[in-house]
Image (cartoon, helix red, strand yellow):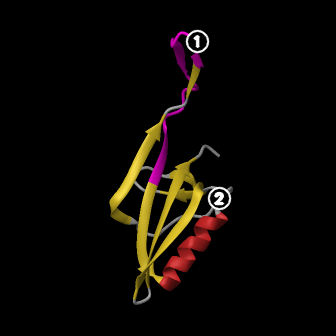
Amino acid sequence: MDTFNWKVDLAGAGRKSAKAARVVKFGDGYEQRQADGIAPPLKTWSVTKTAKKAEADEIEAFLLRHTVTPFYWQPDDVDGKYVLDEGGVQRSFLGAGWCRLSWTAREVRA
């Protein structure tokens, strides 16, 4: 399994944690909720990376190869398996050969 080794921009990075739940809703507004499994919450990271065009091309190609196949990544202190989320990779051109990539990586249990 490939590993994402690039450092991302810490400013503006965001993390969302979500625990799976089963929900049954009734017509009167009442609902029942139940935890779906015992696994810890999965994380979703929204990040950016500012880089020269050649490095940005390399990162974008890596991420696009991992829309289905997970990759190892350690955005915080714990390794995880992630895939590129459905939004893909957005690229902004900053001038003088610099680019800013933005994407969302979603943790998976694969």
Residue 86 sits in quarter: bottom right
Tell me the SS state at disc 2: loop
Residue 59 appears in view: yes
Residue 77 appears in view: no
The amino acid on which the numbered mark 1 sits, given as a three-letter code, is Gly
Q: Which badge, 1 or 2, comes first in the chain's sequence?
A: 1
Tell me the SS state at disc 1: loop
Residue at image point 65% right, 46% down: 110
- Where 81 sits versus 97, above or below? above
In 3D space, how far apart are the residues under numbered discs 1 and 2 (Cα atoms)? 38 Å
Residue at image point 59% right, 46% down: 108
Say which of 38 and 91 sits in front.
Answer: 91
Disc number at residue 67? 2
Residue 17: x and y in percent read 44, 40
Disc number at residue 76? none
The amino acid on which the numbered mark 2 sits, given as a three-letter code, is Thr
Residue at image point 58% right, 61% down: 88
Q: Is residue 29 magenta?
A: yes
- Magenta residues span 24-45
Residue 10: x and y in percent read 33, 62
Residue beneath label 1, please?
Answer: 27
Which residue appears farthest toward the right when viewing the image? 68
Residue 7 sits in quarter: bottom left
